[in-house]
Image (tube, grey):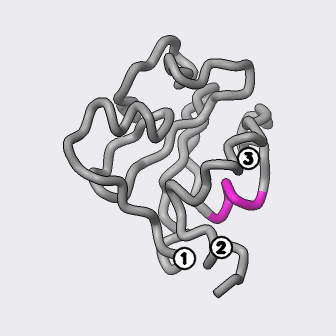
């Protein structure tokens, strides 16, 4: 089973920072290879800066659904807001933070 680090408050990857109904994913951070529910958890528990995933790495399994524990590639995650296995809805508001995790300009085809 995938270990989730950070200020986790339940078994569906919600944390003290993000704990609404659809806050059910954890992200593997490129810099340390650990899964955290959010960037704030990462910053509280690690002593290094966040490194973003480059577009050439978007086929990496780096997102885990907190409900069924299925891992998704970054591409799969960026192209849907539901788990491909259990169909649970992910928080659409996470899009506001994509730039903290992924080279989102590359993901959108922008230069």
What span is colored magenta in the figure? Answer: 75-79
* The quadrant where residue 22 appears: top right
Element carrying mark 1: helix
Query: Visible in this render: residue 1?
Result: no
Query: Visible in this render: residue 16?
Result: yes
* Residue identified by numbered label 1: 55
In the image, what residue occupies the spot 57% across and 60% down? 99
Identify the residue at the far bottom of this view: 111
Q: Residue 107 carries which label?
A: 2
- Percent coordinates x, y for residue 56 in the rendering: 50, 80
Relative to 23, is 75 above or below? below
* Residue identified by numbered label 3: 84
Q: From the viewer's perspective, is 51 left or right of 9? A: left
Element carrying mark 3: loop
In the image, what residue occupies the spot 39% across and 51% down? 29
Crowdedness of circle 1 by 10 Å Cα count: few (<14), some, many (20+)? some
Relative to 17, is 46 above or below? below
Confirm or deny contact between disc 1 and disc 2 (CB under 8 A).
yes
- Percent coordinates x, y for residue 102 in the rendering: 53, 63
């Amino acid at each position: 089973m995938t270990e989730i680090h950070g200020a986790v408050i339940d078994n569906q990857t919600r944390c003290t920072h993000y704990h609404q109904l659809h806050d059910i994913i954890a992200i593997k951070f490129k810099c340390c290879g650990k899964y955290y529910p959010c960037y704030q958890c990462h910053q509280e528990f690690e002593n290094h800066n966040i490194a973003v995933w480059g577009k050439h790495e978007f086929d990496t399994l780096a997102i885990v659904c907190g409900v069924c524990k299925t891992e998704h590639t970054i591409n799969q995650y960026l192209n849907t807001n539901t788990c491909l296995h259990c169909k649970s809805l992910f928080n659409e508001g996470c899009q506001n933070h994509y730039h903290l995790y992924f080279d989102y300009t590359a993901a959108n085809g922008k230069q």
